[in-house]
Amino acid sequence: MPYHIVISGASSVGKSTLAHELLKKFSYDHKKYNRFIHIEEVARNVMQNMHITRQDLQSYICNKNQQLFVNFQDRIIYEQLKKFDENIQQNYISDRSAFDALAFIDSYFNEESAMNIFKKKEFNQRIIQHSQKSYMFLVLPQQTLPATNDNVRLVSTYEEQQQFTELLKKWFNYAKLPYFIITELELKKRIEFVRNVINGHFIYYPEISLPLNLPFQLETHHIQHSQSVVPLFHVEKAPSTDQSFIRYITILNKDEIKISYKLYEKNRFIEKYDHNCKNNKFIILAFEKSVDKLLIENILLNDIIINGVNYYFVGCSNSQLRGGACYIYQGTREEIERMILDNGDFDKIINLSKRLARIGLLFSSGTPTVEISQGKVEEIDDVEKNGYCFTDGCGIIGKSLMRKILSSVGIKDDYDNETVKNRPCALQIRFQGCKGKSIVNFVWHQQKSYQ
């Protein structure tokens, strides 16, 4: 998937300068990044083609000629989206977003007029879809960086720049788009910030906003890498292998997130609903130990939006629970509840911690072997004394079944040769939501009713 970088903000905040410097930087790092195209001067070109001057725009505003002003911004959005469409398969950097025109209408006239443009059939979905496939950056105005007069653009005061910035935030939030705020004035730090974001290291100002809303642009899973967690920029260019990867999001603290890929350790539940994680239905969400418990709670209880799609907490293995991680799933809360109940009678477990632990067994990694019909399973009494159970999780299997299991994982058995030492005789298993160990009963082979 190509990189689409969109830099938005008020006039004279340094968007074009940042775009030009990023192009230079990426051209130096050509081994990481393919060639970038610069989408620029869209509004200026529209002014020239429509024979509109800055004085005309000022006249529209002063004389409250809303229709002419809206028509002009409408044309800018059309041309902006046209550029995005033309370069959708290319890496590009744009020094404005389609939302800039909406914010101008909202600023100089009213929100209703901007909303009418936004909801136009030919605009609405295209604006959102292009934005969801982009890294959206919003440059904050700086009081020490006064607006310049180029005799083309409308000149804004610092207060007007701030107002425009807040309107852009409003429109981004209305469209449920993730975006990153550039607070630095120094160009070098701005470039570093953008590079960190596209490499999967997100810094938020002043802190992570809720509901959690993230871009996760890369979709490649099959890569070769020595580490279990893979930086994003490696993912797209790494060679394909048979190994599967799962998306991995780490909340580092209240204003910092990292996204990456992790080697996918298969478990039955994920395989049932998204084989090899091919459709990104499941994502691992992890929290550093230092993250505030209230933030964790607020993230998990709210919607989690990834690339414009809602995810919700579905469960976690026992090891994940100890390590502060869980799975989130792309679907509705009702769908997730049905999935859980389809895999066990968990609603009968009243104790919440016990219920979570039992559901967690669904996410335990393991090697699938053989299927056993319900009629081939028998419950045996536990060994109990003085209120203690000494056989919790203990089971017995026959030699025939053990032979099938070993064969399914490529192990040759020699059960008929009693002189062979070190014959496998015990398994750690997951079966129908049960966790435990089973040992081979070598007497059972004499009883045909048992395997």
Image (tube, rainbow, N blue to C red):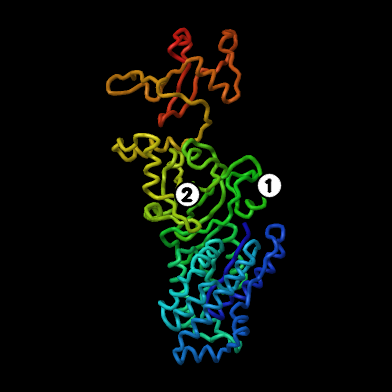
Residue picked out by circle 2:
285
Amino acid of disc 1: Pro
Relative to the observer, which residue lies in front, 144 or 373? 373
In the image, 24: left or right of 112? right
Look at the numbered disc 1 and give the secondary structure of its residue.
loop
Above-or-below relation of 59 to 352: below
Disc 1 and disc 2: Cα gap in Å? 26 Å
Relative to the observer, which residue lies in front, 162 or 132? 132
Of pointers 1 and 2, the one earlier in the residue sequence: 1
Q: Position of residue 384 (x, y in %)?
A: 31, 19
Above-or-below relation of 212 to 75: above
- Image quarter where the N terminus lies is bottom right
Q: Position of residue 31 (x, y in %)?
A: 71, 57
Q: Position of residue 434 (x, y in %)?
A: 40, 29
Look at the numbered disc 2 and give the secondary structure of its residue.
strand
Residue picked out by circle 1:
239
Residue at the image position 59 percent from the left and 87 percent from the top: 152
Above-or-below relation of 39 to 59: above
- Asked where in the image residue 310 lies, by quadrant, the reply is bottom left
Foreground disc of the pair 1, 2: 1
Residue at the image position 60 percent from the left and 50 percent from the top: 220
Relative to the observer, which residue lies in front, 142 or 138? 138
- Asked where in the image residue 254 lies, by quadrant, the reply is bottom left
Are the residues tagged 1 and 2 within 8 Å (C-beta)? Answer: no
